[in-house]
Amino acid sequence: MNQYEIFGAQPQQEKLKCETVEINNGAYCLYPNFFTKFESDNYLERLRKEISWKQESMNMYGKSINFPRLTAWYGDNDKPYSFSGITLKPNLWINDIIKIKQMIEPISQTVFNSVLLNLYRDGNDSISWHTDAEPELGINPIIASVNFGETRSFQLRHINTKEKLQLFLNAGYLTMSNVSAYGADAMALGDVLSDNL
């Protein structure tokens, strides 16, 4: 029995239809329903329990401010990740993350060495504008993102022109890009009705 039979999922080739969103200097590739609703719900439930979630905070104007979400960093032993004045040491890979990683790597043609997980608990949780430009990620890294849970608004903002683009990502959506011009992205407040990973 293979993993698709376990989850009742479609064969992988059925999921390889990329919907391209053209933007200046590149494109975002969307794979709607890369994971079925059943898979998405199961992964969300299991990862909420299995992941070592942390409430991280940053120092702002002399005060410790909690990030409005829970986070976890998993990956190879030598791959710490620094952002917003904090450094995360990687947790060791767990089976469910490895399975997800192995499903995404063939179409991305990339071997991923780490993953940042964000748990948005309700409509008050968010992530602000940021660029994925940390030195650990290299130059123009391929970023793959999967949404498990409620539909969420994923916003992009051009670094120079400030032009904005908004995408709505349903449960099971996979997005991929290595776009540098639209280097700022965010998940807006109020866009998640319940748990979202």
Image (cartoon, rainbow, N blue to C red):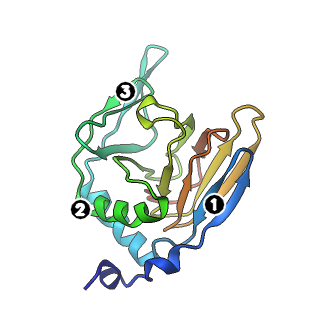
- The quarter of the image holding the N terminus is bottom left
**In this rendering, which labeled residue sits more in front, label 3 or label 2?**
2
Going by the image, does 99 lie left or right of 126? left
* Mark 3 / mark 1, whichever is N-terminal: 3
What kind of residue is marked 2? Answer: Asn
What kind of residue is marked 1? Answer: Phe
Going by the image, does 137 lie left or right of 167? left
What kind of residue is marked 3? Answer: Ile
Going by the image, does 61 lie left or right of 20? left
Residue 105 sits in which quadrant? bottom left
Task: Name the residue that disc number 1 marks.
Answer: 168
* Extreme-front residue of the structure: 109
Task: Name the residue that disc number 2 marks.
Answer: 95
User: Residue 86, labelled with which disc?
Assistant: 3
Q: In this view, does 22 lie above or below 44?
A: above
Task: Name the residue rendered at 24%, 52% in the picture.
Answer: 93
